[in-house]
Structures are given as structure tokens and as C-alpha cells.
Image: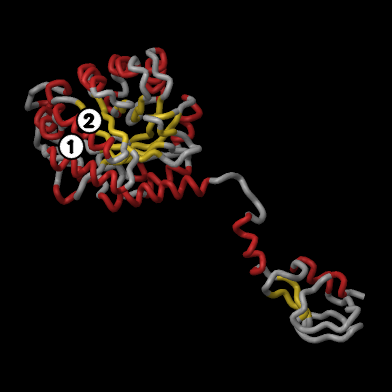
Amino acid sequence: MQIANRPIGTGHRPFVIAEMSGNHNQSLERALEIVDAAAKAGAHALKIQTYTADTITLDVGEGEFFISDPNSLWKGTSLHKLYQQAYTPWEWHKAIFDRCRELGMIGFSTPFDETAVDFLEELDVPCYKIASFENIHLPLIRKVAATGKPMIVSTGMATVAELDDTVRAAREAGCNDIVLLKCTSSYPATPENTNIRTIPHLRQLFGCEVGLSDHTMGTGVAVASVALGASVIEKHFTLCRADGGVDSAFSLEPAEMAALVVETERAWQALGEISYGVTEAEKKSLQFRRSIYIARDIAAGETLTSENLRCVRPGMGLPPKYYETLLGRKVNRDVKMGTPMSWDLLG
């Protein structure tokens, strides 16, 4: 599959997405600085989110609409106020996507309702992301799929049955290119709760591209996921965690994003193929193996012993596996110390 002429799959380097989310802190200038920093770090795409507080929740400040969990990053505020703080103004979208194109990145978004899809279609985005919290929202899935554009779906919290509903709905509505991102919907997530062994299982179950939407700190989990077949990596991104922001606590800074791009590509390059024996790059190193050498001057007819025959570097003589076979045999000529042992020296 392709996204904006960029091939996606295990035969290509991992597709790295920088997720801005609400880390712009309600400043368009900062949002554009984040785009610039993501491009400089080597990210292949930048993603934003398209919703308003009113399209995603109700303006209620109590009960289940109020975040009271003492362990939540967003405790003490209502859902409506949180989304007012986090949302990306729709009038910014074009400027952000234009900057992405200028810098050679793919810009796209996560729509959270049908009106957002209509708006993003006007901007001709090349693909869509479905958030973990929306992967059971089948009306939205069908709306996005009907555009015919590639769809990237985070799997957080979804059961196999729910994912089957999602994938079936997308395919039936016209989406042929689907990427499922293994995702743990906790913020931040911990490595022990990430379960990236699910990645090859997702590929087997649904026959589509797979990747990782990663909320852990650092880059280790994402790099490991590439070894398990992840072809897309998504990480939240900010200029500086210390600046604050709704998702800053689990976002990568520019130097970390640059490391992510480099290390995931290295992991992909290292996969190679099943291979044994000497590679072309290793041929010069054969000389550093041990082999059997004459260890002191010996005369014709003399017997080979542990005193005059040794296994040493370099590797120009007979392999060490013949050492015991050679002991007790006689040489057929005078041989100088440092001569590689060969069968034609034997009487």
C-alpha cells in the first residue's frame, strides 16, 4: 500500500508519524514550530486531531464528565474543558498541512466525527487515522472508509471481535488499505503493558499492514516493534516536555524523535533474511579465525606434536578440527615456523 506515494510495508523503512495532538498549547506559531522540528528530526509524517469540544463530549462539569482520578494526567478538569484546551482550531489545519508539504512531510489528521471528515476532505488529506477511543465508532469508520483513502487504526482496548467489526466495516465501505496500530491506551504506557507480540498476530488475523502507536517513554519499545513486523510507528511529539501541554508528559522531544527515526530504520535494516555462513562483508574477517600452523622449525621426517603444531590466528592453515588427526603424522620436508599447515606437507 501507499500513502501519498510513500510505500508502506515490511519491505520499506518504517513510516514514522509525529503526533502533535494538543502540544501546540493553543498557539499556531508553536504548532508550525512543531512541524518544522518534526521535519528536521526526519519524521515522515505529522498528524493532528480534528474535533471541537462540542463534537466530542457534552459541556457537563460533574459525574462521569469530570476527571477525578488522582493518577490521571488531566485530573481536576472536565472532559469539555480538556478538549477545549487540546483541540486544534480548524482554521489552522491548512497552514499546518501546507507547512508539512513545503518540508516534504505528509500531513494528515484524526477525525472524531463525521463533520471532521467532511472538513478534512475539503483539504484533500491523503489518509486518515482512527483513534483508539473511536475504533468501535462504526458510523465514523464507514464515513472515513467511503473516501477510499488509506486508514490507520489504533487498536487500544479493542477485542478481536471489535477489531473484526471495524475491519469488516471499513472494507465493506470501500477502504482497501488499512494499517492496524498496536496501542495501549494509558498515558504514559509502560513497556510491560505494551504486548508488542500482538503485532505479528494482527497481521496474521486481518491480512493488513501493522504498526505501533506508542505511548511509552523513550524509543526502545518502538525499535523492538520493528523486529516484530511493525511498518508504521506513531509517537506523540513536542518541542520540550517542560513547556507543558495536554500530552507533553509522554511526548518525544526533537532529539528523541531523530533517534527514533534512525534506530527504527536500523532495526529494519538489521532484519535482512535467514542467513548462515560468510557474507560478502565478512570475507576479509576470515583471516582472523584460528587455523593450524607449524609452531617451530622442523625437519623432514619429523613427527607433528603439540610442541610444533598449534591452533593460532590467522586462518590460512587447515581448520582446527583436524588438529588431533595431524598429531603423530610426519612431515615430508623441512618446514619453517609460521608455515600454515596443509595436507601436502605430510609424508
Q: x and y percent of residue 273 in the render?
A: 58, 44
Residue 186 in sight in this render: no
Decide which of 143, 132 is in the foreground and name it: 143
> Given the image, on which type of amino acid does mark 1 rest?
Gly
- Left/right placement of residue 38 relative to residue 291 reads left
The numbered mark at residue 173 is none
Q: Determine which of the numbered discs, if any, sits on residue 49 in the image.
A: 2
Q: Is residue 137 visible?
A: yes
- Dots 1 and 2: beta carbons under 8 Å? yes
Q: What percent of the width, then of the height, locates residue 225? A: 43, 42
Mark 1 → mark 2, Cα distance in angstroms: 8 Å
Please name the residue that numbered disc 1 is placed on.
22
Q: What is the number of callouts on the image?
A: 2
Quarter holding the N terminus? top left
Chain-order first, disc 1 or disc 2: 1
Q: Position of residue 133 (x, y in %)?
A: 27, 27
Closest to the observer, 177 or 236? 177
Local packing at callout 2 (Cα closer than 10 Å; few below 14, some 14-19, many 20+) is many
Q: Residue at x 89, y 74 (%)?
A: 346
**Residue at 44% across, 33% down:** 7
Graded by Cα atoms within 10 Å as few (under 14), some (14 to 19) or many (20 or more), the crowding at tag 1 reads many
Q: Where residue 148 appears, x then y in whole percent?
A: 37, 18
> On the rendered structure, is 345 left or right of 91?
right
- Element assignment for label 2: strand
Amino acid of disc 2: Gln
Quadrant of the image containing the C terminus: bottom right
Position of residue 218 relative to residue 104, above or below, is: below
The image's colouring method is secondary structure
Residue depicted at 82% across the width and 80% down the height: 305
Callout 1 secondary element: loop
* Above/below status of 187 relative to 140: below
Please name the residue shown 39% across and 23% down the image: 163
